[in-house]
Amino acid sequence: MSIFDLGRMADAPECSAAGCHDAAAWTIAWRNPRIHPESRVKEWAACDAHRDHLRDWLASRDFPVEVVAFGTTVERVG
């Protein structure tokens, strides 16, 4: 990455999957119920190819998860 990439990243958020540089199409909203109140929402960005993988990884840890179109605001998760 160079300094010239910084402007593009703000316009086209990338997938949160390790090593993926595809544009995000989904927001995966989640929280760790052992340490976060219901009002705390963490977000990962996901491309089409990694949406299910990232959601399943979080769900397998019993974290409440919600998948919505990228740019949609989620107020609470589970």
Image (spheres, grey):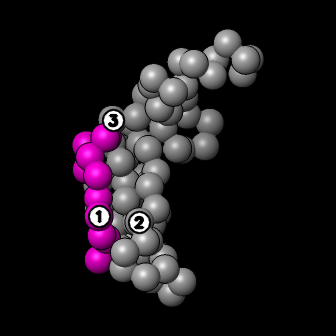
Q: Nearer the viewer, residue 42 or 49?
A: 42
Q: Please state the horizontal and vertical placement of residue 44, each as a whole percent of the image.
A: 46, 51
Count of residue discs: 3
| Residue under pointer 2 | 41
Asked which quadrant contains residue 30, the reply is bottom left
Q: Secondary structure at mark 1?
A: loop
Q: Nearer the viewer, residue 54 or 69?
A: 69
Q: At label 1, which amino acid type do we have? A: Glu
Residue at position x 74%, y 17% in the image: 2
The overriding secondary structure of the stretch rendered in magenta is loop
Residue at position x 26%, y 46% in the image: 72
Residue occupying the far top of the picture? 4
Label 2, label 3: how many angstroms apart (C-alpha)? 18 Å
Using the image, tell me which numbered label, if any, was put on residue 75. 1
Q: Please state the horizontal and vertical placement of residue 57, each as a whole percent of the image.
A: 46, 63
| Residue under pointer 3 | 25
Marks 3,1: beta carbons within 8 A: no
Of mark 2 and mark 3, the one earlier in the sequence is 3
Label 3, label 1: how many angstroms apart (C-alpha)? 19 Å
Question: Which is more foreground, mark 3 or mark 1?
Answer: 1
Q: Nearer the viewer, residue 72 or 58?
A: 72
> What stretch of residues is rendered in magenta?
68-78
Question: Which is more foreground, mark 2 or mark 3?
Answer: 2
Quadrant of the image containing the C terminus? bottom left
Q: Is residue 56 visible?
A: no
